[in-house]
Amino acid sequence: MFYLTDTQITEFVGRYLWPLFRISGLLMAMPIIGTRVVTARVRVVLAFFITLVVVPLLPPLPSVPPLSMQSLVIIVQQVLIGLTIGFFLQVLFQIFVLAGQFMAMKMGLGFASMNDPANGVNVTVVSQYYLILATLLFLSLNGHLLVIRLIVESFITIPISEQGLHIEVFLAVANSGSWLFSRALLVAMPVLTSLLVVNIAFGVMSRAAPQMNVFAVGFPITLIFGLVLIWFSMSSFLPSYELYMGEGFAALSNFLRMP
């Protein structure tokens, strides 16, 4: 008969348990899959099947009893690694959400907000439009497969042990906020600059004809100009998306290779 010893069962459980926690942390925090639209049951099933595929590709894991303090420390480290990767992916998507906020405030659509079912917060319609575009491009360009590749490589660069991410990684992720604002401003800059010229023109008109109600005339014209400018800026959306996503994934790869 075929018998399994306690040591073999412990190694088998540990071999699949620790990668499962890192992958689960990623799926819980990353865009699209980590949103409220995807239920927890779906995320658990995805994490389970991804773990089954990934585990045969991993290097040898440490021999630590699953029900020990060392195992608890390893589990916490794996969850932190997955959450950090997922959080940085959220930063990439928030570039276009923040750019939409800048445009909406400048063109007078700041009041036109709607509930984002994915994140459960109110965002402007322009931000929601850009977020939908970014999500569709992410899936069409196989971004989800690239994320799985990154998580597999992370097991090689950051092997499963009691030592997780270096403190410099967390500082770099925190400093990514400035990178987020700068890239969002670059995405919105053409529309913001053009609307600034329109507002200056209305200021000159108000000085030339004080009897004209600038607010009654300028608001609909600014709104129309803003929509037209967004339409014209769509030609540069894909190159900007590829550039900033490339920068983000390159930075994420550098984070995962930090000693």
Image: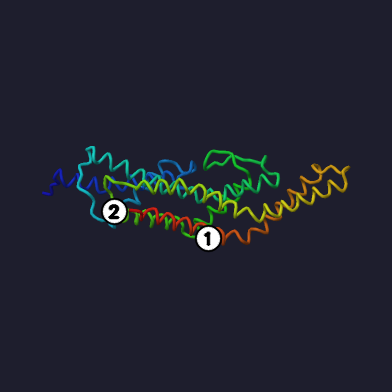
Instruction: Tell me if mark 1 has few (under 14), some (14-19) or many (20+) residues whose alpha carbon lies within 10 angstroms of its own.
Output: few
Front residue of this view, candidates 208 and 161:
208
Position of residue 232 measured from the top left corner of the image (x, y, whole percent): 68, 59
Pick whichever, 56 or 184, lies toward us.
Answer: 184
* Circle 2: residue type: Val
User: Which structural element holds mark 1?
Assistant: helix
In this rendering, the answer to whether 186 lies above or below 122 is: below
Residue 32 visible (yes or no): no
- Residue under label 2, please give it: 55
* Mark 1 to mark 2 CA distance (whole Å): 32 Å
Tell me which colouring the rendered structure shows. rainbow
Residue at the spot of label 1: 243
Front position among marks 1 and 2: 1
Query: Looking at the image, how many numbered discs can be counted on the residues?
Result: 2
For disc 2, the neighbor class at 10 Å (few under 14, some 14 to 19, many from 20) is some
Question: In this orientation, does residue 250 appear?
Answer: yes
Residue visible at 68% across and 46% down? 106
Q: In this view, does 156 lie above or below 48?
A: below
